[in-house]
């Protein structure tokens, strides 16, 4: 409705006419920018509501990916979490400043400009205030500039986060598909991969220097000749061709530069503040792992009551067990699978299929698909057998070796489950240890992966 009102006022403007040199088009843009504050507030309101709604699910998914050792998924949600935090801070600040601007406009309507003479201050204060404030209209104009630039820079910062992500992904892709490539000879892969990674790191450093100095490398003639090809490559790596006009519009404006330099230390200060924590004790820490002296809630199902709670390395139903058996769950993770492959290298696939993939499969030969399913079932049995060979339990001094099965637990978490007979235990406190065998050179050693305290009382 808002756009239709403005468009009706542009009698000579026709839909589809996007000639930016046209006086009519420029007149339309002038009209839009005069009323852009309304659009800014509408977009900020919807965006803040959506970001607040999405922030907690994104944080939970990030923690879940970290808990399951899914590095790619963790990076994606980590970047989304950062982008969400930046937008929330900037848009909330924008709404506050816009509110102040609207309030200043209303006050100007009632009171007009500041009349310093009516305040009857001393000459010294009157001169100082006139020099610092100058006029109320100037104050309103500054607020307008801050609001408009802040709104634009909010979305520009998301592109900067995306640019950093693309550079990191470029390094990972070179490492995975060139340095560890089976297609290229080892020497050629090392040389080509090493050169590409050095180029990306060196280019990233120069691009960062050019960014913080606001184009110093582009100003020096002899340096610009060296920097130009790097700049050209990184314009694609960082996707800067999508937002380059915004960047240079900021750089050619003194006010935009000033606000950019002002926001940078604010972001650093916020990062430092969010990393602060108050320590209550010199020796006690609630983030330590479960042991004979400490019981962490992520090892007991009945204590994980919040949506963001995820299981630890081993989970039992409760601290207090009254049944003659003990349910034990070991969550699956990519790191756990790497341990299985290291223990039984015959399970290591020729092509690692972990990571992002499409669920759409095209196969016209049903017999091949049936054969493939049978092979997978056979490998799964071997996989589970290896897992059972690796893992066992010890309760106090009593060794236990029970067979695991593959299952899904609370919140559809994949893992391994078994039940231990504990009717022979005395009532009171006990320690259960999850023990794992691993290969070290030509020998096999046993280590403790997790230690949990629990209390057993018969019904």
Image: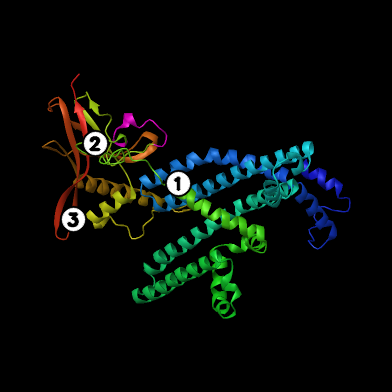
Q: In x, y percent, where is residue 395?
A: 15, 35
Q: Residue furthest top?
A: 459
Circle number at residue 294: 2
In this view, the residue in front, 96 or 391, is 96
Q: Tell me if 1 is positioned left or right of 89 in this view.
A: right
Whichever of callouts 1 and 3 sits on the residue coming sooner in the sequence is 1
| Residue 23 drawn above or below residue 358 | below
Camera-nearest label, 1 or 2: 1
Q: Position of residue 174 (x, y in %)?
A: 43, 66
| Disc marking residue 273 | 1
Q: Give the residue drawn at x 46%, y 49%.
A: 271
Q: CA distance from mark 1 to mark 3?
A: 44 Å
Asked whether disc 1 touches disc 3, contact meaning CB atoms under 8 Å apart, the reply is no
Q: CA distance from mark 2 to mark 3?
A: 29 Å
Which residue is at 38% across, 73% downward? 189
Residue topped by disc 3:
439
């Amino acid at each position: 409705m808002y756009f239709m009102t403005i468009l009706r006022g542009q009698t000579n403007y026709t839909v589809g006419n996007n000639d930016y040199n046209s006086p009519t088009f420029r007149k339309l843009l002038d009209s839009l920018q005069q009323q852009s504050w309304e659009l800014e507030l509408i977009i900020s309101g919807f965006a803040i509501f959506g970001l607040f709604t999405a922030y907690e699910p994104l944080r939970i998914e990030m923690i879940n990916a970290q808990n399951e050792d899914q590095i790619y998924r963790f990076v994606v949600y980590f970047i989304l979490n950062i982008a969400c935090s930046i937008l929330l801070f900037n848009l909330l600040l924008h709404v506050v400043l816009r509110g102040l601007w609207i309030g200043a406009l209303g006050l100007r309507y009632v009171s007009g400009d500041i009349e310093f003479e009516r305040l009857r201050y001393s000459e010294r204060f009157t001169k100082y205030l006139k020099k610092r404030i100058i006029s109320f209209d100037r104050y309103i104009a500054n607020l307008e500039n801050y609001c408009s630039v802040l709104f634009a820079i909010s979305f520009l910062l998301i592109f900067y986060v995306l640019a950093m992500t693309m550079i990191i992904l470029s390094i990972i892709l070179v490492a995975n598909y060139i340095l560890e490539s089976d297609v290229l000879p080892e020497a050629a892969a090392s040389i080509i991969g090493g050169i590409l990674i050095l180029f990306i790191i060196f280019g990233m450093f120069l691009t960062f220097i050019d960014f913080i100095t606001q184009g110093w490398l582009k100003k020096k003639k002899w340096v610009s000749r060296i920097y130009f090809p790097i700049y050209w490559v990184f314009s694609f790596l960082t996707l800067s061709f999508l937002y380059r006009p915004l960047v240079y519009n900021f750089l050619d404006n003194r006010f935009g530069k000033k606000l950019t330099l002002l926001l940078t230390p604010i972001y650093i200060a916020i990062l430092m503040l969010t990393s602060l924590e108050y320590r209550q004790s010199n020796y006690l820490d609630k983030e330590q792992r479960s042991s004979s002296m400490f019981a962490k809630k992520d090892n007991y199902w009945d204590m994980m009551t919040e949506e963001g709670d995820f299981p630890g390395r081993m989970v039992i139903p409760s601290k207090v067990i009254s049944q003659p058996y003990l349910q034990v769950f070991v969550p699956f993770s990519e790191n756990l699978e790497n341990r299985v492959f290291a223990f039984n290298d015959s399970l290591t696939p020729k092509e690692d299929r972990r990571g992002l993939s499409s669920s759409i499969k095209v196969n016209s030969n049903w017999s091949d698909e049936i054969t493939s399913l049978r092979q997978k079932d056979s490998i799964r049995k071997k996989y589970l057998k290896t897992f059972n060979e690796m893992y066992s339990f010890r309760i106090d001094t009593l060794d236990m070796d029970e067979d695991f099965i593959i299952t899904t637990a609370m919140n559809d978490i994949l893992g391994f489950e078994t039940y231990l007979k504990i009717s022979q235990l005395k009532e009171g406190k006990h320690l259960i240890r999850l023990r794992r065998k691993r290969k070290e050179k030509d020998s096999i050693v046993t280590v403790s992966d997790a230690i949990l305290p629990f209390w057993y009382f018969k019904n």
